[in-house]
Image (cartoon, rainbow, N blue to C red):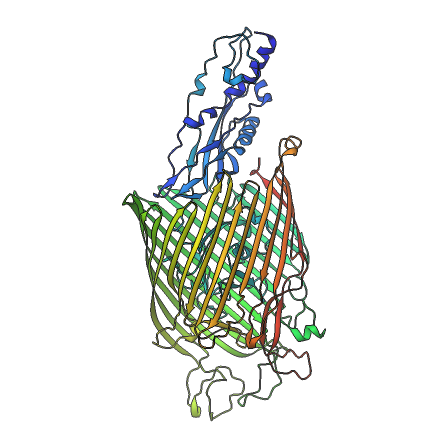
Amino acid sequence: MSSSARTLARLLLPALLASGIPRVASAQPAPVVGTGHQLVAPKPLVAPKAVYPAEAQARGEEGSVTVLADLDETGAVRAVSIAVSSGVEALDDSALEAARKWRFSPALDDGKPIESQLRIPFHFHHVELPPEPVPSLPPAAVAPTPAPAPVTPLPAPPELKPTSPYESSVRGSKDPPSRGASDYHIDVENLSLVPRASAAEILKLAPGILLTNEGGDAHAEQVFLRGFDAREGQDIEFTVDGTPINESGNLHGNGYSDTHFIIPELVQSLRVVEGPFDPRQGNYAVAGSADFHLGLRDKGLTTKFTVGSYGTYRMLLAWAPQHGSPGTFAAVELYQTTGFGQNRDGRRGSAMAQWEGKVGSSDVRLSAQAYIASFHTAGVVRQDDYQAGRIGFYDTYDSRQGEDSQRYSASAEITSHTDHITFRNLLFGIARPLRIRENFTGYALDVQTPLQTPHDQRGDLLDLNVMEGTVGLRGSARLHGKILKQEQELELGYFARGDFVSSTQQRVEAATGHPYQTDADLDSRLGDIGLYADANLRFTRWLALRGGARGDLFTYDVNNHCAVPITGDVSHPTAPVNDVSCLSIENMGAHREPNQRASTVSGALMPRASLLVGPWKSFSASVSAGKGVRSIDPQYITQDVKTPFASVGAYEGGLTYQHRFRDSIDLQVRTVAFYTHVNHDLIFSQTVGRNVLANGTTRIGSASSARFTGAFWDLAANLTYTQAKFDDTGLLVPYVPDLVVRADGALFGDLPWWKDKLHGHALRASLSAGFSYVGPRPLPYGARSNTIATLDGSASIGWWFLDLSVGAQNLTDRKYRLGEYNYVSDFHSTPYPALVPVRHFAAGAPRTVMFTIALNYGGKS
């Protein structure tokens, strides 16, 4: 053999022997670890070999490396890490580099693409060639090079006997079967690049959702969905991995749901069901439900530091183990800001930790969370004062407004399996202190009454305090097996929850800050126990009937410590009562205690069903019907009187188109028409500072959405049109938008021309944008709000362990009114105010620019 051929053989042979991967096509994946239902493991489509580093060859270094690869729903490798190291850094780096280029078909869960995790072994074996002429390489291995003189092929060494090249496991519990076109399983993925002020804003990826907030960053968002003014959660069941967020018995609003404790980087996906169509949905699922699924995609230790407009600083420290599940993580966030305009300063801290793993044969998840926040808020501004120049667009009338919020919770979930049954049980406990100070009306309401001592108007600042403790559990048993050659399922589940709530609302004097009147003082003990049955019946591959029924029993025990307020029916008292808030006398001066206890119990039965047809040539159709309930506010409880539940009947029909083009391009389009009727609605009253009962309402409309993803892009858009009217008058329900449009998009990827210039690590970059449009909203007394149109954007660049990004919300710096209202107020801005309804607004944030530097240690090789 010539010296050049000998040299070529010395270079190519070790590289060939460095990988046992070429036999991928004939290898069989290891058994899938699942939950007893039909799971299909990912299969390799592109499997490049690892390169044997020249320096390792020169030193005679060899070994085996096992790479742990996380795959997304498309089968793309999202993250890689070392599961078993060779002990040689160069070999480990080469294996990681090769694994990043692998491409798989997605793992399937009953035909639906899901995330998965697998192991890829790479073998590096150094072979010493003898100095004498050696046989040439097999022709296929050196096809690009002119073949030397014919010789006997070199046999493969023992180390290269065929082995399984990867092991696959599918993570997580099975998602409930889809309820049709309005059941949105939303993976955040690269749309997390779009700037968002909080985790709640991820909800905008679902059609028809508008978020407003006149109460500041420690106050729950007001949520609008499909024609419902859900306020702070009264009509949407919110959960985080199954643990409730809604607060039963909160005096500010029954079902109050503050999601600010959720760290945005931990939200991996959402399941939003618009409508009461799943038997698992419980209390408050009137407009629908939303469940946040948490996990941390970046392995190792990640630190982020953000600085931006209006003295805003944010620090994040997050950790996930190299070889653990994405559901195992710990993260701490600290945030502070001076705020845009007047009286918007605040600070918060949030800590969240979770562990997922196996204990024996069971899957276990343990979670804990702590959150504290304190913010001031500007409240509302009168439109006439702003137009006259008496107050600025971002100013405030009352600097005492604000919120102090805390939340502490812990949960434990265990999932176990037999051949045909999967058992799940979740235990949770929550402690929730809250204080809210709001002034909607200025000095309009503190009028002189005959039983009060003479006084000037003292102000209408509301001081609300709530202390709530919640304990509960939920669980299910899912049976599955084949009948009629189709996989059939039946799930039986339960839910139990107890709430212990103490709440007061007082009015505070402007001059002294002293409370001068108690509006409400309640101690409540609330219980909710529910059972449900859900069947997933497949008649053929393209026809399925899903649904069942849920029954809940609600109990109330309420002690009203201010049952006879000074505004009550008091005539001819024997002695002046002056300014006593909670009277202890009745008609003609008869004595009574100021409190009144009431208890009652009531049940609700909620049938739900969905019929799904398809897919045929990527098209599917569905029709759904269901009933949902909202439990009543404890302040309306009367002894032994059946609770007047708010009950909703919902019906819809929809079409879905879902198709994969090639290996990495996915398109999903949905459209649905819906009809809902509610027998008792709730409408916000600025006079009492919370929701009050109203008459029945009806909503009719449509919602459409699309998502288009590829190797370097992720685009999503949705549009919802709704008309919501009162049944008795035909008038539009106030504050509810009829048109909501949202679009999000991101471009991302490595810059290949920098690949070999920065120590072998590619330069990555991204661009993203988000656009929102909200049409005019009806207001009381026949008025209409202004429209909202905002544009957000961000750009980032990263290399190895370092990422730099800049993001901006409201790029055009538009002055928009996030919330608008029409009612009577008097803020002493004019000497003689006209006590007629006038427009008020809560200002949306001006342009806000944030710069972030992120470092990752041990997660990005």
| Residue in front for this viewpoint, 138 or 645 | 138
Tell me which residue sits at (55%, 24%) in the image.
Answer: 51
What percent of the width, then of the height, locates residue 36?
34, 43
**79 to 146, vertically: above or below:** below
Q: Quadrant of residue 639?
A: bottom left
Q: Is 549 situated left or right of 70 in this image? A: left
What percent of the width, then of the height, locates residue 362?
36, 44
**249 to 616, vertically: above or below:** below
**820 to 608, vertically: above or below:** below
Quadrant occupied by the N terminus: top right
Single out the residue that lies furthest toward the right.
Answer: 389
| Residue in front for this viewpoint, 763 or 678 | 678
Quadrant occupied by the C terminus: top right
Q: Is 548 situated left or right of 80 in this image? A: left
Tell me which residue sits at (51%, 82%) in the image.
Answer: 581
Q: Is 766 situated left or right of 200 in this image? A: right
What percent of the width, then of the height, locates residue 166?
44, 31
Residue 656 in view, yes or no: yes
Q: Quadrant of residue 313?
A: bottom right
What percent of the width, then of the height, locates residue 25?
43, 27
| Residue in front for this viewpoint, 374 or 424 | 424
